[in-house]
Amino acid sequence: MTTAVSSVTSRNPADPSDVLVSFPAPGAFAAVAAVERARAAQPNWSTGGAAARSSALGAVAAALEAAADELTALAVREVGKPLTEARAEVARTVAIWRYYAQAPYEPLGAVHETAAGPGLLLTRRRPYGVAGLLTPWNFPFAIPSWKAAPALAAGNTVVLKPAPEATACARRLAALVEQALPAGVFTVLPGGATEGNALVSAADVVSFTGSTAVGRAVVHTATARGIPVQAEMGGLNAALVLPDADIERAALHIAAAIAGYAGQKCTATSRVIAVGAALDPLREALPEALRAVAVGDPADASTVCGPLINEPARDRVSRAWDGLSVLAGGTVPGLPGWYAAPTLVEKVPPDHPLLREEVFGPVAALLPADDLAHAVRITNSVPYGLVTSVHSAGLDPVLHGLDRLDTGMIRVNAPSTGVDFHLPFGGAKESGHGPREQGRAALEFYTSSRTYTLSPAETM
């Protein structure tokens, strides 16, 4: 599913000589053993009562909040997340655990009358058992948390397999979580494809976030076993700019969505579609906004665009603009670490990989559209459908086009990036498979529904 590794190594992308962790990969048997320990711990965790689970998740939130500065610094160092974004991610992580700490008190089902005669019909949700979570490196605390917290709140136990590049973050998260939970309820399993394959082959429910290629493999393995699976995968997100939009404001939003965290978000903007008369002013404003983005050391509070996660990622990004007309960027800064300048290109051929494949870096294409209907067709022309941002001063044209967009999320007059964790998150087409994440949708995913028929022993 991912590249097999004999050892787990994580480096600071701003200073590759700084190695955070390096140790032998634990192997498939370790994955199976972790699942079995989690399975043994699950019945007591599930039947211990709502108050116990709520209190434990609340204690996790408190522990994370107390360690916020440490966690922020670790995210900056291990995954190159700019300081301001790292602080925001840690704060969101705390809020996620607090939100789901209330979930154990939510109703588990409903009561209905029978269609005919005395008796009652009940529906009741119950946990599956062991949740196997496979998470990426780009949100090393928030994504594991928005998967683990609802799974735990619903009564499952968790085995988390993080991306190797975020191993130190995952281990520190686990150390804080495990202090508040009984033994075996939450386990981190470091490693690569071998450990990931073993986890998907042993868990009772699986949640994955990462590339489309790996997500397909996860879905195939899980569905072959007949277990529930959700996979949040790639994106090739568009920003639609209508002629009546505030062009300067739209340019700032779009520049942030292209270059923030070096474009290493599944919700980043990689296509900018200018409708009609919006093209010329946007062609001036957006390159200017991108050139103003601060690129550099992620530990600097002013930095917006830090390093790419590793050298292959930097090389992939630098190849993306080869042979294209560059309006901004198109360079590799002479900095220690793996950097690429925020880049905007134009006159991109329709069959160019930039318009078909996710680059996962600070690169976007500017595309003209005749009208809103044309812009919608361009937006929908790619295999992905995660999120679209629409920029307009008028409500009517926005509403007119929204329902025809094949994306799971639509953001109006806002960057394509940004997540509200109490609402469903997910995409269409190759961006997602299975039920949505976050909010109440996550609680439903991690539980199965049963229907009970209660008939009286005898009729009076």
Image (cartoon, rainbow, N blue to C red):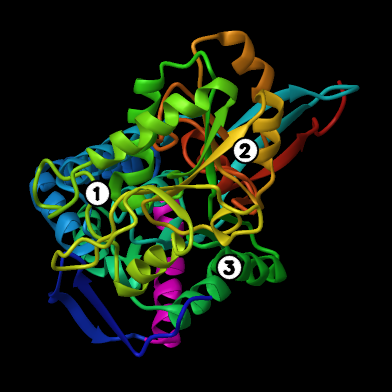
Crowding around mark 1 (Cα neighbors within 10 Å: few <14, some 14 to 19, many 20+) is many
Crowding around mark 3 (Cα neighbors within 10 Å: few <14, some 14 to 19, many 20+) is few
User: In the picture provided, is 415 more to the left or to the right than 229?
Assistant: left
The residue type indicated by label 3 comes to: Ala
Q: CA distance from mark 1 to mark 3?
A: 26 Å
Task: Name the residue rendered at 69%, 65% in the picture.
Answer: 223
Which residue in the structure is indicated by mark 1?
Answer: 305
Q: Main secondary structure of the magenta part?
A: helix
Magenta span of residues: 27-46
The mark nearer the N terminus, 1 or 3, is 3
Q: CA distance from mark 2 to mark 3?
A: 19 Å
Which numbered marker is on residue 407?
Answer: 2
Task: Name the residue rendered at 63%, 14% in the picture.
Answer: 397
- Where residue 47 sits in the image (x, y, percent)? 44, 49
The mark nearer the N terminus, 2 or 3, is 3
Give the structural element (helix, strand or loop) at label 2.
loop
The mark nearer the N terminus, 1 or 2, is 1
Which residue in the structure is indicated by mark 3?
Answer: 213
The residue type indicated by label 2 comes to: Thr
